[in-house]
């Protein structure tokens, strides 16, 4: 031992053993490390796979949302285009309609302007107190009136047609003279109405005339038809025309011819639609746009046209077409009221009979 010869071999064996032990421990460690590393990697791989699956699901969901939004956008775009196209079409139709209505309105305005001009000319040259017989053929005598008849054999007259052949405002030839005195109450009512002339019967002026003249004059046996006639007169939609031979009924009536210097007029013996009495009816009336006609007696026609003449004159006043002073207008209104009273009592010109 002191020489050290036996110790060296023992140290070599121990060193080899230690080396083997170290190498085996290293291998074990390496194996453990590898196993642990493998487990960690597997865990990380599983986690990554799970994360990828979640991301795939999210991508799929987002893709569906995108597809849905694209589809909704396409539908919205198509709907907007369709709505815009519809609005453009409607605008074009409205524009065309508006242009058509504008043209019609301009045409009506031209017609109304022409009618106003004609009315002004008519009023300036012919008023109820001084009519122009050239403008009113119905005022001419039967001999001169025959030369102005239309080819159809009769003339249609609206409710503004004149009743009596004598000139309104000019007294008929009479052996007696008459004087006149103004009623202050009637004149005051007329002046109050003339400040704001209208056809509203609530005014004291028209209320009195309705009560004392118009309603009694248009009060016939057939009350229902009487109301319709009064409404048509007020609306200026009543038509009075002579009975033409082609319009005579074939039954329940006997037609007669009334001779004259230049021809004849037809008459039909039947019941007057207003009075219900059998008379020779030479005229018939139509209410508004209705197709039915009503045959009327001369007395009924005189009563209707007397009221029509009154309404025509106050419409002239309302439209500012009468160029007379207030007193002249008042006396013309009183004359027209007297004509309604006379017609109501049954008097009418013989050339109507």
Image: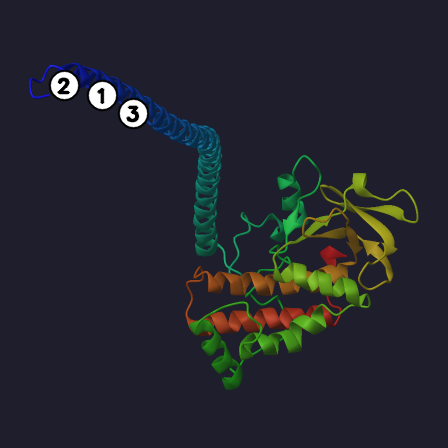
Q: Is residue 72 above or below residue 227?
A: above
User: For this view, does 30 lie left or right of residue 338?
Assistant: left
For the point 42% across and 30% down, the residue is: 50
Task: Report crowding for label 1: few under 14, some 14 to 19, many 20 or more residues within 10 A (C-alpha).
Answer: few
Task: Report crowding for label 3: few under 14, some 14 to 19, many 20 or more residues within 10 A (C-alpha).
Answer: few
For the point 35% across and 25% down, the residue is: 41
For the point 50% across and 85% down, the residue is: 184
Q: Earlier in the sequence, mark 2 or mark 3?
A: 2
In percent of width and height, residue 22 lies at 24, 21
* Residue 201 visible to an observer of this rendering: yes
**Do callouts 1 and 2 mark residues in contact (Cβ within 8 Å)?**
no
Quick one: which residue is furthest to the right in this view? 252
The CA distance from mark 1 to mark 2 is 16 Å
Element type at mark 1: helix
Per the rendering, the mark at residue 130 is: none
Residue holding disc 3: 29
Q: Is residue 262 above or below residue 342?
A: above
In percent of width and height, residue 189 lies at 50, 80
Q: Is residue 295 above or below residue 227?
A: above
1 or 3: mark nearer the eye: 1
Element type at mark 3: helix
2 or 3: mark nearer the eye: 2
Compare residues 202 and 239 and report the one nearer the observer. 202
Quarter of the image with the C terminus in it: bottom right
Residue holding disc 1: 18
* Residue 129 visible to an observer of this rendering: no
Element type at mark 2: helix
The CA distance from mark 2 to mark 3 is 32 Å
For the point 92% across and 45% down, the residue is: 251
The CA distance from mark 1 to mark 3 is 16 Å
């Amino acid at each position: 031992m002191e020489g050290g010869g036996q110790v060296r071999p023992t140290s070599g064996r121990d060193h080899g053993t230690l080396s083997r032990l170290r190498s085996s421990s290293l291998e074990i460690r390496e194996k453990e490390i590898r196993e642990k590393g493998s487990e960690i990697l597997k865990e990380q791989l599983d986690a990554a796979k799970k994360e990828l699956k979640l991301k795939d699901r999210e991508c799929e969901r987002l893709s569906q949302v995108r597809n849905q939004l694209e589809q909704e956008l396409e539908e919205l775009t198509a709907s907007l285009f369709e709505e815009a196209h519809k609005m453009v079409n409607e605008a074009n139709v409205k524009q065309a309609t508006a242009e058509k209505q504008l043209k019609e309105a301009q045409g009506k305005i031209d017609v109304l302007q022409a009618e106003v001009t004609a009315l002004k000319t008519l009023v300036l040259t012919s008023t109820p107190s001084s009519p122009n017989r050239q403008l009113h053929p119905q005022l001419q005598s039967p001999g001169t009136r025959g030369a102005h008849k239309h080819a159809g054999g009769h003339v249609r007259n609206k409710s503004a047609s004149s009743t009596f052949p004598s000139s309104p405002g000019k007294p008929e030839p009479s052996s007696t003279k008459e004087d006149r005195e103004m009623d202050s109450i009637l004149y005051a009512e007329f002046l109050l109405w003339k400040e704001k002339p209208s056809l509203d019967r609530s005014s004291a002026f028209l209320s009195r005339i309705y009560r004392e003249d118009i309603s009694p004059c248009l009060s016939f046996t057939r009350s229902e038809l009487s109301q319709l006639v009064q409404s048509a007169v007020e609306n200026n939609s009543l038509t009075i025309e002579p009975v033409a031979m082609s319009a005579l009924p074939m039954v329940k009536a006997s037609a007669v011819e009334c001779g004259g210097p230049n021809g004849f007029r037809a008459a039909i013996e039947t019941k007057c639609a207003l009075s219900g009495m059998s008379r020779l009816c030479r005229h018939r009336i139509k209410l508004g746009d209705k197709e039915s006609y009503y045959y009327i007696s001369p007395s009924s026609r005189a009563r209707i046209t007397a009221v029509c003449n009154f309404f025509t004159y106050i419409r002239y006043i309302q439209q500012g077409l009468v160029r007379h002073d207030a007193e002249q207008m008042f006396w013309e209104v009183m004359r027209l009221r007297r004509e309604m009273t006379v017609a109501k009592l049954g008097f009418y010109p013989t050339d109507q009979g």
